[in-house]
Amino acid sequence: MMRHTLVGAWVLFVVSAASAAGFPPAEETAKERLNASPRHAELAKVDVHGTPVRTWIVYPERKERAPVVVVIHEIFGLTDWIRAVADELAAEGFVAVAPDLLSGKGPGGGGTDAFASRDDAVRAVSELPRDEVLARLDAVRSWALALPAAASKSASFGFCWGGSTSFAWAAAEPALDAAVVWYGTAPADLATLKAPVLGLYGGDDARVDATLAATTAKMKELGKRYEPHVFDGAGHGFLRAQGGQDGANLKAAKEAWPLAIAFLRRELGGAR
């Protein structure tokens, strides 16, 4: 397990300026980044057993076909921040798709936007049946791979609840070529896992970090590829909450994002 430490005093820059290039914005500047993006993005509907799953898709600006990265949202649902993450992945040369896994679950059959509060969305996500979530992810992945702009390889890329879902989906879907897990836990059954997994964790996240030793040992025992990184001082959700932990979250974000992109390029191809 690789541990990234804070050395000396870390000066916290203004988040909106510090996140202006090279990695996703903090939550509070996500909408601004989306509005300024030059990339083509659209909201599509993917039919899954009769339910249209709203899916945000962003295309890279490149001539060649690009690998697909399925972005799995946090427990907050499909937010502007998750859409901004997809935009940044497209800037790195990938076709990025972010399904709203709350599609059809909200008031009036809506999705994340239909819920009256973030707490309501959190409650709804926490109640989603795992089998239904995985079926929706499978359908969105198949739909994305059939796009004219898509190459043949794909990866999952999830945060928090979505990080755990990314790990579980990789264990359930052998056709995935890679999985990135941002501060999420591993499923109980890892025997069927085929894809390599990159794990990115905050050092001040005891709930998740307490599981890492067992996960690392089990992955090694099974001969699976697992690359965990722990960023000292950073908290849970550090890529979104870049202003937290006295600068440790921003430092972790700046270190973790290039690791994630390098991992995707190594496993999927798709360099800009």
Image: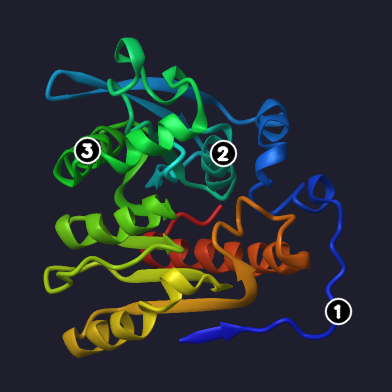
Q: Is residue 106 above or below residue 167?
A: above
The residue located at (72%, 68%) in the rendering is 251
CB atoms at circles 1 and 2 under 8 Å apart?
A: no
Q: Nearer the viewer, mark 1 or mark 2?
A: 1
The residue located at (32%, 9%) in the rendering is 108
Q: Could you classify mark 1 by the number of other residues whose Cα lies within 10 Å: few (under 14), some (14-19), or many (20 or more)?
A: few
State the residue position of label 1: 9
The residue located at (24%, 59%) in the rendering is 168
Mark-to-mark CA distance, 3 and 1: 47 Å
Would residue 67 be found to the left or right of residue 22 on screen?
Answer: left
Which secondary structure lies at badge 2? helix
Residue 204 in the image: x percent, y percent?
58, 73
Q: Is residue 116 above or below residue 237?
A: above
Residue 218 in the image: x percent, y percent?
23, 84
Whether residue 62 appears in this view of the structure is: no
Q: Nearer the viewer, mark 3 or mark 1?
A: 1
Q: Earlier in the sequence, mark 1 or mark 2?
A: 1
Q: Amino acid at mark 3?
A: Ser
Image quarter (top left, top right, bottom left or bottom right) of the N terminus: bottom left
State the residue position of label 3: 142
CB atoms at circles 2 and 3 under 8 Å apart?
A: no
Q: Could you classify mark 2 by the number of other residues whose Cα lies within 10 Å: few (under 14), some (14-19), or many (20 or more)?
A: many
Would residue 196 be found to the left or right of residue 200 on screen?
Answer: left
Q: Amino acid at mark 2?
A: Asp
Mark-to-mark CA distance, 2 and 3: 20 Å
Depth order, front residue of 266/2 = 2
Q: Is residue 114 above or below residue 55?
A: above
Whether residue 151 appears in this view of the structure is: yes
